[in-house]
Image (cartoon, rainbow, N blue to C red):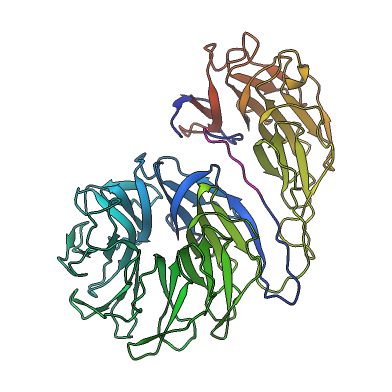
Amino acid sequence: MRSGLSTQFRHGLMSSAGFLIGLCLIFIVLPSHPSQAQSTVDFELSWISSESIDSECIAWGDMDGDGDLDLAVGTRDEANLLYRNDGGGVFTEIMGALDTNTAWTASIAWGDMDGDGDLDLAVGNAEAANQLFRNNGDGSFNEVTNPFGSATTYTFDLAWGDTDGDGDLDLAVGNYGPKGGPYQANQLYRNDGNEVFVEVADALGTGTYKTNDVAWGDMDNDGDLDLAIGNYGEVNQLFRNDRDNIFTEITGTLGLDTAFTYSVTWGDSDNDGDLDLAVGNADAANQFFRNEGDGSFTEIIGAFSMIAEDTLSLAWGDANGDGYLDLVVGNSDSPNRLYRNVGGTFVEVSDAFGSESKESWGVAWGDMDNDGDPDLAVSNRYAVDQIFRNDGWGGLKEVTNGLGTTSRDSKSLAWGDMDGDGDLDLAIGNYNQNQIFRNDSSPITPGFNLVEIPDALVSDPRDTGSIAWGDMDNDGDLDLAVGNWNVDPNNPDGINRLYRNDGGGNFTEVVGALGPDLLSTWSLAWGDVDGDGDLDLAIGNSGGWSSTSEINQLFLNDGDGNFAEAVGAFGTYPRKTRSLAWGDMDNDGDLDLSLIHI
């Protein structure tokens, strides 16, 4: 959980390192490429979330209007998550942005419900009332009180759409029900402005279904939105919009099969000007319905595969920029799939996401890095969430895993241009030997081509909890501070350490720079606390073997890279500190300090 006691000290704050309550672990993995005989695409794993949680859904949206896509994640029995895109594939979690409600969220949907130019967020819950969060325009959110009523729902999907053509977004709600029933009817909420939503009674029929997904699309090109509904173990449904929020069910349009459907998604796959429909099933082969342009649909048997997989999510996107929509498939009992659209025919891209199976409840395309092609976010249940960066089609050179293949107990990492060549290198703090990876990217090997520098740091085993780059001696290159914890009282290798960079990415330990004490350090942060033009170091401790091990520390830099402890700078009361960060909170020109304790 993310709860913790927060403390602030005035006078300090510029950079932060370490991790908050959940340990932060991010990987960059370069793709391997199949042979030329196979359809290929280049994706690299760009980011994974800091924790393995039960993620149920995921959605891209530019919440702060800065031109890049941010990410919302709905979870089960955890607080929902919001990540701000800081550019370059870096995402920062906005703690508590969507309150601390730990309901089972099965669906989230971005939409500008109040027409003020920023994206608001609807949250569909199971075993709780649905929620709506108003965007205040600065990336912060306030919950709108019971816009959809206060009754407990079992909502598994939401979809915004202007169903009545009045210029504001209405909301379709796909409901399920508790195990064994009773099941709940699907709902349509008309937006009357001023955050007022009115349920349109029986707009989507009076029957109760086990609905997993709803999707708006103008299937008949008459200028209004129609609705496809995917049901579990029941016939899927299609509702034609006859204007004024009057909907007519077109019975049998999507066949009479009663598959376990989890996902439905519209897309003009053949570029004929009308929307086709992909259907993701869990107990039968996935389905594709071609729109004939006259309101009828033809199922193309085996369009994707004849094999039944446990498909939970689908998303259309032009992955290779050829003008045709490709399809990504999120599965549970088999690897996720990518189907390349070759002029209306689908060809699987072999091992597009590797061979590992995850329980991927959500997949969503979005150009996170503004390079013109769609990247992919994946929400996984009981596993870390992922983002895949799209590097386009056609690259056939195999690139080995830049971070090696050894499993390590890594607890901290930090990017920094250690060798001054203009790209970011990576330091990783581990339970055993710490690591430094040099980024050898070039026009020939673009992206992240990471090469481990053997024994760049002292190879003695230690348990590192935090690392932080900073130019401690003002020589123009980045030095490295290492905070260690959970140490053996008889092993002096567990002291905190400081490494000086010689300018070429070679490091020498400054012996004893941070004192001789065996501490349990969880966080480090550089900042010029005394305004003398050099970086000082704050150290957050959480308990160790010496009498002062839980007292947080401040080491002042004399300008030459020599440090002296300012004893008692943060008080003498022992704490269990997990994170600290410098920042000028009162705009008085000096750095203040924020700390989080447990």
How many dots with numbers?
0
Q: Which of 256 and 211 is in front in this view?
A: 256
In percent of width and height, residue 282 lies at 45, 64
Q: Which residue is drawn at 73% across and 70% down?
A: 395
Is 370 above or below relative to 271?
A: above
Q: Nearer the viewer, residue 235 or 524?
A: 235
Judged left or right of residue 398, residue 411 is left
Is 443 above or below relative to 491?
A: below
Q: Residue at x 59, y 80 (%)?
A: 322
Quarter of the image for residue 173 reads: bottom left
Can residue 357 be seen at all in this image of the molecule?
A: yes
In percent of width and height, residue 125 lies at 32, 50
Q: Furthest residue to the top? A: 547
In percent of width and height, residue 182 lies at 22, 54
In percent of width and height, residue 382 lies at 51, 46
Judged left or right of residue 326, residue 290 is left
What secondary structure is the magenta-colored segment mainly?
Answer: loop
Q: Does the magenta-highlighted stretch encompass residue 534? A: no
Can residue 477 be seen at all in this image of the molecule?
A: no
- For the N terminus, the image quarter is top left
Is 542 above or below relative to 359?
A: above
Q: Nearer the viewer, residue 113 or 401?
A: 401
Q: Which residue is drawn at 67% across and 16% down?
A: 565
Q: Tell me where the magenta segment starts and ends, as one range.
A: 21-27
